[in-house]
Image (tube, rainbow, N blue to C red):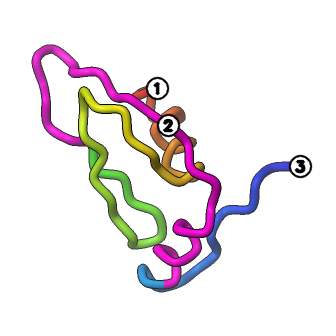
Amino acid sequence: MAAKKPAAEDPLKTGEALAREPRVLVRLASADGEDAPVDVGVNGYFTSVPRGETVEVPKTVADLLADAGYL
């Protein structure tokens, strides 16, 4: 069974749902000298994931980064 994604209409509720999710360690490599963070949005809630650092993110954010080819 797939993990339940936050089903919220407003960004505040989505942020609260993401805060309750299991955390995953991720590290985004620099791409062609690009060191800008990667912005990830889930149902209107946005977070910025830095490159070159190992950080904890909610599982949904890690899944989106993987789907987009960052991981």
In this view, 7 is above or below 67: below
Q: Is residue 41 left or right of residue 5?
A: left
Q: Which of the two labelled residues, at mark 3 and mark 2, occupies the earlier sequence position?
A: 3
Residue matched to label 1: 71
Name the element at disc 1: loop
Q: Residue drawn 34% across and 64% down? A: 46
User: Which residue type does callout 2 highlight?
Assistant: Leu
Q: Residue drawn 45% across and 45% down? A: 56
Does the magenta portion include 25?
yes
User: Which residue type does callout 3 highlight?
Assistant: Met
In this view, 1 is above or below 67: below
**Total residue callouts:** 3
Q: Quadrant of residue 33?
A: top left
Q: Quadrant of residue 47?
A: bottom left
Residue sitting at the far top = 32
User: Which residue type does callout 1 highlight?
Assistant: Leu
Q: Residue drawn 66% across and 62% down? A: 5
Name the element at disc 3: loop
Q: Residues within 10 Å of mark 2 (few under 14, many from 20)?
A: few
- Distance between the Cα atoms at labels 2 and 1? 11 Å
Does the magenta portion include 2?
no
Looking at the rendered structure, which numbered label has been put on residue 1?
3
Q: Which of the two labelled residues, at mark 1 and mark 3, occupies the earlier sequence position?
A: 3
Residue matched to label 2: 25
Q: Is residue 64 left or right of residue 53?
A: right
